[in-house]
Amino acid sequence: MANVQTKATKKWREKVGIISKSYGLKKDLAEAFAAACEKAGVSQASQISKMMKEFIEQSEKG
C-alpha cells in the first residue's frame, strides 16, 4: 500500500494536470541535455516544457 506522501503527491499531480511521458531518444543526446540543464541550473522538465511551448507558438504562427 502506498504511503501518505505518495498518495498526496499523486493527488497533487492529478490536480495540477501533470502527466508522465516516455520518449525514445539517443543516449548521447539525452545525456548531453541532462548535463546542459544541470550546468544552467534548470530542471529537465522545465526546459522541455519551455521548448514545447515555444514550438507550439511557432507552429501556430506559421
Image (tube, grey):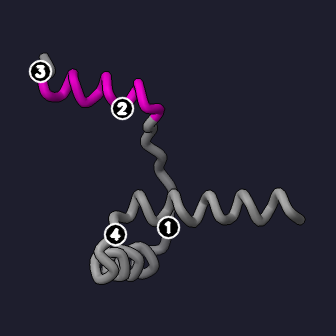
- Residue type at tag 3: Val
Secondary element at image label 2? helix
- Marker disc for residue 4: 3
The quarter of the rendered structure image containing the N terminus is top left
- Residue type at tag 4: Val
N-terminal-most mark, 1 or 4: 1
Give the distance between the C-alpha atoms of the residues marked 2 and 3, in whole angstroms: 14 Å
Span highlighted in magenta in the image? 3-17
Residue 44: % across, % down: 38, 64
- Residue type at tag 1: Leu
- Marker disc for residue 2: none
Residue at the (80%, 62%) spot, across then down? 59
Q: Is the residue 28 above or below the residue 52 in the image?
A: below
- Taking depth in this image into account, of 10 and 15 the one nearest to the observer is 15
The residue pinned by badge 4 equals 42
* Contact, mark 1 vs mark 3 (Cβ under 8 Å): no
The residue pinned by badge 1 equals 25
Give the distance between the C-alpha atoms of the residues marked 1 and 3, in whole angstroms: 34 Å
N-terminal-most mark, 1 or 3: 3
N-terminal-most mark, 2 or 1: 2
Residue at the (41%, 77%) spot, across then down? 33
The picture quadrant where one finds residue 54 is: bottom right
Q: Is the residue 4 above or below the residue 31 in the image?
A: above
- Marker disc for residue 13: 2
Label 1: few (<14), some (14–19) or many (≥20) C-alpha neighbours in 10 Å: few
- Residue type at tag 2: Arg
Left or right of 31 on screen, residue 50: right
Secondary element at image label 1? loop
Tell me which secondary structure the magenta stretch mostly adopts.
helix
